[in-house]
Amino acid sequence: MDDEDQTNFTQMKDGTREDYAKVGRHSVRFFSGLPDRILTHLGLLAGDTGGYAVDRLTHSLQSSTRALRDGRDEQYVVCALIHDIGDTLATTNHSELAAVVLEPFVSEKNHWIVKHHGIFQGYYFFHHFDLDRNMRDRYRESEYFTDCAEFCELYDQNCFDPKYDTMPLVEFEPMLRRVFAQPLRTIYAPEN
């Protein structure tokens, strides 16, 4: 980046339209690198098993492999791929971090599934920690309750099999790039 393409203000309130045109050009270039940053972050999941029979990356790849083989659409498969991407930074609320990354790019239903899968997956193990395994019931009235329960049953709780024929990450890269190519909606819209 050369000095001519960089702003000089030290406070955002002092920027001009021309300054923000420069910032906008940089933002477009930075945005185009989002799929690469997600792929890099997925790589951070490799090696750490969290005590399970496979590492976190393999779990995510099994989830997306199963979804793809079941004929789910690309958006759903990509959601399955990155549903646990928040594990490295948001250990106690990983599903919410993944959902925030996905929100502008996926349907409301797919966003809801990823956002809430952390509580829904608890159905399979919370009772082993003396927690309420039916904690997910607080969302029983949601139109997406069954969808999230199905996701956890078919593409989360069963994806820890070291013998499963898991597809490699490179197979999912093109669909990840397509899903993250263009937001479906703007999250920060002016209020009326």
Image: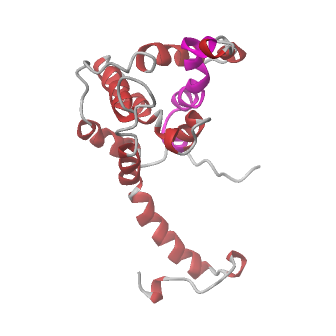
Query: Picture coordinates of residue 147 (x, y %)?
Result: 53, 17
Work out whether residue 173 or residue 191 is closer to the camera in this orientation and state it.
173
Q: Which residues are magenta?
A: 101-127
Residue 126 appears in which quarter of the rendering? top right
Query: Picture coordinates of residue 109 (x, y %)?
Result: 55, 26
Residue 44 visible in the current orientation:
yes
Q: Residue at x 53, y 30 (%)?
A: 114
Query: Picture coordinates of residue 181 (x, y %)?
Result: 39, 49
Does the stretch in magenta take in 41? Answer: no
Q: In the rendered view, would you say 5 is above or below 84?
A: below
Looking at the image, residue 69 sits to the left or right of residue 143; the answer is: left
Q: In the rendered view, would you say 65 is above or below 183?
A: above
Q: In the rendered view, would you say 176 is above or below 122?
A: below
Residue 67 appears in which quarter of the rendering? top left
Residue 61 appears in which quarter of the rendering? top left
Query: Picture coordinates of residue 177 (x, y %)?
Result: 34, 46
Q: Residue at x 68, y 15 (%)?
A: 131
